[in-house]
Image (cartoon, grey):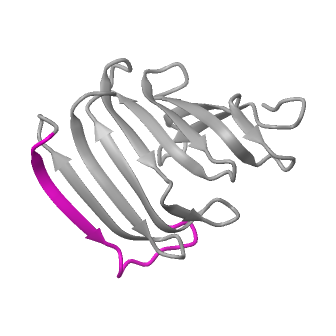
Amino acid sequence: TFTADGHPLKGETTSYKLDGVTIKDYSETDFTNATFDEDNNIIGGYITTKTWKTNGGALKSESKVTFTADGHPLKSETTSYKADGTTVKDYSETDFPNAQFDEDNNIIGGYITTKTWKTNGGALKSESKVTFTADGHPLKGETTSYKLDGVTIKDYSETDFTNATFDEDNN
């Protein structure tokens, strides 16, 4: 739905499993707190999205994406829920200040970092950094996972995408 000014107000999406019939999940995005320019591009504020297993089913996740005045994402915060739809599975924050963007807000270099906790304010589960090429393809991923105490390192891994081939959608 749209506002009287033609700006997005609410977006609803139903995703299907491979059979094209079975619903995978349903999400709603609220644009109430986003700021738009005359071309309906986001130039600040934030959007929130809730995703359920089905329309009216158990809650899978809630997220908030905050944008810069240039319309680039600044920070993404996501709470994921267990199958019951109420118990928090984990909470993550992805930071974008070190990423470079083109005029369509696609990443064209730099890196993003993500931290994941057991709950918002709980023990740290993992930290990751993904570095991108000038074409916006991932170049390298680095992840540190922590034991239950959130301090002791469980393992560290690096993924090198140098020999990977990507399509125009970075798949």
Q: In this rendering, does residue 24 appear at all?
A: yes
What is the x, y in percent for residue 112? 43, 57
Q: Residue furthest right?
A: 4
Image point (43%, 47%), residue name: 94
* Residue 11 location, quadrant: top right
What is the x, y in percent for residue 69? 69, 48
Q: Looking at the image, which is closer to me, 151 or 130?
A: 151
**Image height check: is 118 above or below 127?**
above
62 on left or right of 121:
right
Is residue 161 found inside the magenta-colored segment of the image? yes
Q: In this rendering, does residue 171 appear at all?
A: no
Image point (50%, 55%), residue name: 97
Q: Looking at the image, which is closer to me, 25 or 35?
A: 35
Is residue 106 found inside the magenta-colored segment of the image? no
What is the x, y in percent for residue 129? 34, 58
Image point (28%, 35%), residue name: 117
**Image height check: is 91 above or below 135?**
above
**Image height check: is 142 above or below 26?**
below
What is the x, y in percent for residue 164? 38, 77
Quadrant (top left, top right, bottom left, bottom right) of the N terminus:
top right
Task: Magenta stretch: give its range.
Answer: 151-170
Image point (78%, 42%), residue name: 36
Q: Magenta: predominant secondary structure element?
A: loop
Q: Residue furthest bottom?
A: 163
